[in-house]
Each structure stands twice: as C-alpha cells, then as structure tokens.
Amino acid sequence: MTHFAELLLTGISMGSVYALIALGFVIIFKASEVVNFAHASLLLIGGFLIAELHGRIGFWPALLAGAAGAALAAAFVEFAIIRRSRAANHSVLAIVTIGVDIILATELTRRIGTQVMAMGDPWGDAVVHFGEVSIPETRLVALIVAGCLIGTFLLAFKYTGWGVAMRASAEDQEAAALMGVRLGRISLSAWAVAGALAAVAALFLTVFPTPGLDRTTGMIALKAFPAAILGGLDSTTGALVGGLIIGVTEALMSGYQGEMGSLGRGLGDVAPFLVMIIVLLIRPAGLFGTRELTRV
Amino acid sequence: MSRFRLRAGVVGAVILALAATSCASDKAVDGEAAVGADGVKHGPGVTDDTITVGMITDLTGPYAPLGKSISQAGRLYFEEVNAAGGICGRKVEPLVRDMSYDVQKTVSAYTELEPKVAALPQFIGSATVASVRDKLEASGPLTLALAWAPSILGAQSIQMTGTTYAVDVVNGVDFLVKERGLKAGDKIGHIYVEGDYGDDSLAGSKYAAEKLGMTVVEQKVKATDADMSSQVSTMEEAGVKAVILSIAPKQTASFVGVAATTGLKVPMLGSNSAFAPQLLATPAGPALLGDFYVLQASSPLSADLPIMKKIIDGYKAKYPQDGLDNGVMAGYTGSMVIGDALKKACENKDLSRAGIISAHRSQKAWDGGFGSTYDFSDPSQPPTRSTFILKPDADALGGLKIHKDRFTADLAASYPVTAS
Amino acid sequence: MSDSRNARLFRLALWAAAGAAAVLIPFYLDGFWLMAGLFAMSAAVGAIGLNLLTGATGQLSMGHAFFLAVGAYTYVYLSSESDDHLAGLGLPTGVAAIGAILAAGLAGGLFSPISARLKGAYLGIATFALIFLGQYLMHGAEAVTGGYNGRAVPPLTLFGFSFADTPELIVLGIPFGALERLWYLAVLVLIAAAWFAKGVLTGRPGLAMNTIRDHETAAGVMGVPVSRYRAGVFVLSSMYAGLAGVLLALVFQRTVPDYFGIVLALDYLAMIVIGGLGSVGGAVLGAFLVTLLPQLLTRYSDSLPLVAQPGTSGGFSPAEAARILYGSVVVAVVLFLPAGLLGLAQRVRQRLPGGLPHPSTPSRSAP
C-alpha cells in the first residue's frame, strides 16, 4: 500500500509539472493557433540559465532570470518569426517551430556539452515522511508551486482584461481585433508566459531526485504533447487534467511493470500516447476541448 | 513530337558515348598493385609511405563525451608511433568521422572509409556496429568495436576490448556473495535500460542468481527517464539485499541519491557505462561515495602503472583543456591493439586486409602493459573475463580508485557467452 | 512563338542534363556518394508521399517514419528465411517488396478512425504517437524485427537479376556492386513514384485534395466525400512511405529501430516545407537538400570557416553546423519563400528570357 501511495504521489507531483508545460502549450495555441514544437528548447533555455547563474547571483534571482530569459526567448520567437509568417497555414507554422527548436537545441546542447548541471536549489535531498510514505521535499514544492501557478492562470483567464482578451482572440480573431483587442500584444504575452512556465517546469524536472540538467532534459517536454492534446488543445483546465493523467499513468506503469510481465517492459514510454489515442477516439477534440461545429 | 524523339535519341547517344568512355573513371578495375617497394603486400589504405586508419565515432550525439576522449587519445597514440618512426616505415594517418550515434550517418561513414583504410581502431556503439556488421563480416577491415554486447562477437574482423556486460555482472554478483555476505534465498535488484547493454547485463545477473539460488527483481527503464524514485521504492518494497545498475550515468546518480534518503541501505554495483566522473560534482556526489561500486574490465586511470602515467602525461600535454575520463584509456588501448596488429602483419610482410586480421588473431596473450593479458585468438569470445571492482573517489584521477583488483569468478569463467 | 520554343529548348536541355547525370554517376562516383544519392532518392519517394498528405491535403502527419519502418520491416520479414530466433516467410523478394508496400498502406488504413476524424494539431500529435508505438513494437517484437540490433536485409532479386555485390558484374570496365545496381533501380522507382503522384495532383483527386486543404466545408458542400478522401490520401501516403522504407532497407542492408525515430519524422516535414508544399518537384528538391547537406558538411568540413574538424576541439562540429544551418533554412523558407525553393526556382525561370508565366502556387487558407 505504501508503495502505491508513493507512486501515486510521485505521479501527481510529476503530473503537475507536466501540466505547467502543457499549460504553456495551450496558452500559445489559444493566442496564436500555433502548436509550438520549440517548447522543449524553451524549457532547456530556462533550465540552463538557472543552472549557469545560481552560483553567481544566488538561487532565487537565478530562478527569476531563468524565467525572464525563457520568456524573452519565447517572445522573440513570436515577434521575429511567428508574426512574420502569419500568412502561412497552421501546419506550416508548426513546422517552423520545429526549425526553431533544431537551432536552439543544437546550440544549447553544444553549450551544455557533457556536464550534468546542478540547480543550486535550497531543498536539496530532504525527504518528508507521512507515516510510512516518504516523498522528496522538491516534489511537494513542485506540486504546490505548479498548483498555485495554474490556479492563478485559471483565475486570470476568467477575471482579468488580459484573460478576456485572450479568450476573445482564441474565439474569433477578426471580431476580437474589431473590438479593440491588440492581437499582436496578446500573442506576444502568451508566448512570454509560456516561456516562463517552461523555465519553472525545467527547475522541477532537474532538481532532486534527478542529478541535474543535461543535454537530454528538453526531451521531457515531449510528454506535454499528449497531456495537452488529451485535455484539449484550447482548454487550460484540460492541460491540468491531461498533465495529471500522464504523470500518474507513467508512475504506475513503471512502478508495476514487474507485475505486467514482458508486455510491460518499456510500456511507460508508450502509455501516455496510448491513453491519448484512446481518448481521441472517443472525443476527437480532447476531454475539455471545444468541438468545431460546421453547419452545412 | 517526332522532333522531340529525334532530340531524345541524340541525347541518349551522347550519354552512351560518355558511358563508354568511363575507362577514364577512377572506379575502373585495375590490376592489383599489391606489393610495396619493400616487399610488403599492400591492401586498402596502405601505400609505400602511409597507412590510413579510420575512426567512426560520436562527437555530437549521446556518447559525445566519450567519443571525444577516445578519438583524441587515439590520435595521441598514432602521433607517438609516427614520432618513433611509424609502423613498417610508414606514417599512420587517422581519419575521424562523426556519426552522432545515427545509423544513416554510420552507414555513410563506413561506406566512405571502408575502401580507404587498413583498419578501424575505433567504432563506437553496439547499434551502430550492428548496422554495418554484415559488411564488416564479409570483407571489412580489422575493427576495434567499443561496445560490450555479445551481439558484436563472432566475426573475424571485429574485436571487442575488455569483456561483455554479462561477465562483468557475474563477477559483481560473486563479489557480493564473497564480500558482502549475500546468500541463497536473497533477492538482488537489477535496474537496466532497454537495449543491448541492459539486456545482456540482466542475462548475467539472472545466470548468477540461478546458479547461487537467488532471485532477481528486475526493473526496466527508458534511456530518457531521469527520476529513479519509483524504482527505488519498488526495490525497497521487494526487500532486495543488493542492487545492480545497468543504466545511464545520470540515472545512476538519481537512483543512488534517492536511495541514500530512503530506507534502501544496500550495496549497489554499477556497470562500466553507469558511471561518469562528472557525477561526483552533482548533489548526488556524496551518495555515490557511499556503498556504491563500479564494475569495469579495463584498468582505471588511477591504476599505478607506468604506461598509465605515460598516457596521462601525454594526453594532458596535448589536450590541456580537456578532462580525463575512461574514454582516454579506451581510445589509447584500442589504437594500441590495432597498432600492434599492424606491426605484427608487417613482420609477416602482409599488410593486406586478411593479413592484418590473421596477424591480430594469432595473438593469444597480448600484453599492453596493463597487468593482464588479452586472448585475441577466438573471435566468438571476449578477450578477457576478469573485472575490477572500483570505488568512486573524488581525489582519484578519472574519479575511480581500485577497491578490489581484477579477478575472474568461477561462475564468470563458466558463463556461456554466445555470439549472435 | 520563338519565346516558347526557347523555353522548351531550355527545359529539354535541363532534362537531358539530369538524365545524363542519372545514368553516368555510378560510373564515376565512389560508394560514399552513391550511398548519399540512394538515401536522397529514397527520402524523395517518402517525401512525395508526405507532400500528398500534408502539402496537398493539409493533413499534418508527424508519424511518417512509422510507415517507413512498417515497409522496411515487412520486407525483411516476408523475404527472410526463419532461423532459430528470427521468424520469416521466405517469399520471393519481389513479392515481399510489394507486400511491404501493401502492409504500410494497411497500417495507414487501420489508422483511419483517427486520420479521417482529426485535423490540424490534433492529427499531428496523434500521428506523433505512432513513432513511440513503433519504437515499442520494434524493440519488443524481437522474433520479427530482431529487436535492438535489427535484422539483415535480403538483397532484392528481380527476374534472376540480383541487386547485391555478388555475382560479380563488370560494365564497361567498372565493377557494379550492390550500390551501383540499386542506383538505377532507385532512379526508376523515383521517376515512377513522381509520375504517379503528379497524375494524382493534376487530376480530379488533386483538386478535391486542395479544396479539402483550403476549405473543408466548401469541399463537403460541393460533394467531395471528405472523410473518405482524407483516409484515402492517408493510405496512399503510407504506401509511399512503405516504398521508401523498402528502398532504404535495401540500401542499408540492415534495418535497425533507432533509425525510425522522431528525428526522421521531423526531417520529412522539413523536406516538404523547404522544397515547397503540395508539389512533387518540391518534395524531391527538399529531400535531396535535407539528406545531402549534412554529408557535404562532414565531408568538406576542413575547408569551411567556423566548422571544426571531426575529432578535434573548438568551433562547431560539422554535424552541429549542419543542424543549425538546416533549422535556419526551414525558418527562412517559411518566412521568405512561402512556396519553398521550388517556387523560387520557378520565379527565377519566369525572369529568364523566354520564360513562361507559371500558374501561381496554390493559395493558402486565410488564418
């Protein structure tokens, strides 16, 4: 039973970090209708900055700098590339972000090289015990921080002018522009926010129980794809639920692979995608996505 | 339309005429200019004044750190050889090709190098070697493969250094029984990564456990998994008495780091690819200095041997900005093995491909000065079955010091290594 | 009148040059270049298929590499003999090749509940799942795939002629090994694949596909069976991928799972964007560029600034330089050449004396 509880807790906390990445993904999609495949690199930029700077300026300023750096990088991508290629259709925009990802990831892996970079976080390898169940402090912090950030966003989406503008532009860009919503600004801010969220996610993906940031850290962002799609690409709630589903599925899959025999070997990798395919077969727009209706 | 056909006819005729003059091409079959001025038989990559060797390495992919040290140490060896007059009175020229651990690039690199080289003193990775294995076996040059899976054994032209993952693990289990008091009925945990490396390691632990009346609790992980908490929790749950780790270095750091904070207080053994000296600088560093050991067939850099000193000093002088890791040792030794095969082939006056391979295979007890001998005569077996037990040490060169000198357990000597 | 004749002459000269190159290359270039050319031609076949789907019909697929794997592995499975640990059916290789293409099409058909219902990003990421599924199957189903280390590929034999190094064959003093023989096969396959795809695109199906891409609702109103078309194009594109997979397997002479991964799937998307979406020529051009660029850089790295030689420190390694250049080309093409490099070539040709005004490239849907 403790084993199960530990796995579940790990799954939920990892899921909340995936949800952070997926949320950024969804925000970008809502604002500029782009599937951002460069998300992995944004995550790597944030993590790399934190790891590079914490020795010089301390952990908290480094975290801010990392989030700001990733936000700036994301905003730059939107401003210099995405906005300029407005004319292209969505598939092409998705492919452009693949190009951006290749450039950024190559340069970052070259800089990271063979290092495993520590994040210099204050939690270290402390572990919290709830009776029999023990969980690293970092995981709890991840859960709390991710929960707060996601909560803040859901509220901001509902109640602030920015959120209303964002929802309006996602609903109907032309109408929103006519009503005075500045599409460019909305799109820019969405990218920046997504970048900052990715940097926070990078921190929690590379602190204990993992040894630190290395060249492959960005690959973890791939798990946010099925999370975002599962929940529905235009739903912030969906990103949260999708992230949790993926995190828990993965933890349980790898924890109980021994009981599944040869079938279970390596299934953890495929499981998120299998879950996603099943959901899509039942609901083509994801669990919380809006279904496009075309009347003929 | 007819005019078009006429033109097409003219074009076709011109093409055929050009093709007929293809005797001007370098590819034309020529008579074998097979013997050099000094009476030594030549093969591909050998001329009267140079011997060309090739290295297919990874400088930009997952094994980039190792690939870099291996290539640089290989270059170092051949420079030393050339400074001392070369081999067979000829200068040795290494050609290095990066394949980023990508199969397509590997096949391209091999296709390019194959006609140009006398031998391949470095070829990294089991999947990459496997991708051109059939070609190597058919007519390839003597190749030193840096991979320790049994699937690369069994070809006359492919040579492994050290021993297979499974043999290392069998020796490791023997060490656990003899020195850490494991006994029949105990459980051994084994975390392994999918692929050759993990599968073969698991075969070793299962063999040893079966012979000793123990059971293996296995957990397969993916190469991309970074967090080993759930694996630690599973091992704790199962009540294992020791854990063997056949995973990537950062996964090792995670596992050992997490285990240190929970109730899993058991000895842990890492395969030779599960540790990297960079890990000692991470937050998991202190945990790795605890009850954790590394299984390795080759001598560590910190071994007290004159040849080791020579390699290290030479490397530091030539590449002052680069750190030292196991790749330095592997690269130098591998090139040395090839260098010695070339020297021997020269004594036999036969530097053809077959001549180099048979010269190499004629060595039953090759000794490079590392305190042990390698038997190269049987291509279906690893050249040695002995393993060091090493202990991470922040002050030791390469981050590892000898905990238990090289030994071959009886179980390892009888372990059936089957080449594919 | 004379203008159009000049244009015709120009085009004829171009085709003649290409034909001459295709025939003569095996007589002059060494194995490395033949290998590079074969990879490029195989990639071109696969890219044509993806361009029918993504470029012409607007269905984003990130799973193209999976169908390549289905083709390659099915060929190996059907043509190999069984032994102690690997299964095979031992069919004649020609039959196996056709079976492999059909199997890839079948795999595409089985995916139709997804491919006919989803679109845009959803379809893209759903097909992305296929890559992971493929890796799991290739590593897991060892009896069929040989697992991690893959399987040897039996050489193709057609009408008694074997595309292998043996038996020895010398043409005009040049030894013809497997690569030289496969070269001509690949040229013929590529021409046939391009010709068929051109027929599809210029005919009624092509019109319907473009209408689905540009305005799905309108296509439905005009009586195009949208779902059926989308599933059908998906199957056709998978068959192209299967054919490319068979060619690749023959060139590699061994299939390994590692090759059919994410990078390959993304490379294919880059090919069609760089070359030009929705056209056959664009797919071929993009495939050649993406496949040959890294090879050229690695081969001639010593004469390029900024690029370090393999095996030494400092600067960008050729592989890194190739990746960055390649990413930049993708971005630059989308920003500045919405019709891809092929569109650029056509515009240049219009400027030439006697050039014909070309029909403009397919219109894009408004965002």
Image: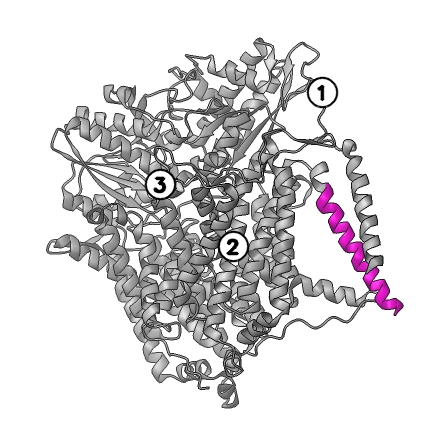
Residue C125, placed above or below residue C33: below
Disc number for residue C143: 3
Q: Assign the N terminus of chain C to one quadrant of the image.
A: bottom right
According to the picture, the residue beneath numbered tag 2 turns out to be: C241
Q: Position of residue C366 (x, y in %)?
A: 57, 79
- CB contact under 8 Å: marks 1 and 2: no
> Residue B354 magenta-drawn?
no
- Cα gap from disc 1 to disc 2, whole angstroms: 43 Å
Mark 3 Cα within 10 Å, few/some/many (few <14, many 20+)? some
**Labels 1 and 2 share a subunit:** no
User: Does any portion of residue A67 appear in the rendered image?
Assistant: no
Look at label 2 and name its amino acid: Ala
Which disc number belongs to residue A127?
Answer: none
| Element class at badge 1 | loop
Which residue reaches farthest bottom? A179
Magenta residues? Answer: C1-24
Question: A295 or B122: which is nearer to us?
Answer: A295
- Measured as percent of width and height from the top left, residue A248 is found at 25, 60
**Horizontal placement of C300 versus A219: left or right?**
right
Q: Dot 1 corresponds to which residue?
A: B31
Say whether residue B2 is left or right of residue B350: right
For the point 27% across and 48% down, the residue is A263
Q: Which residue corresponds to the image point at 74% horizontal and 49% vertical from the top-left?
A: C19
Type of amino acid under label 3: Ala
- Given the image, what chain letter belongs to the residue carrying mark 2? C
Q: Residue at x 44, y 26 (%)?
A: B329
Q: How many marks?
A: 3
Q: Position of residue B393 (x, y in %)?
A: 32, 32
Left or right of residue C155: residue B264: left
Callout 2: helix, strand or loop? helix
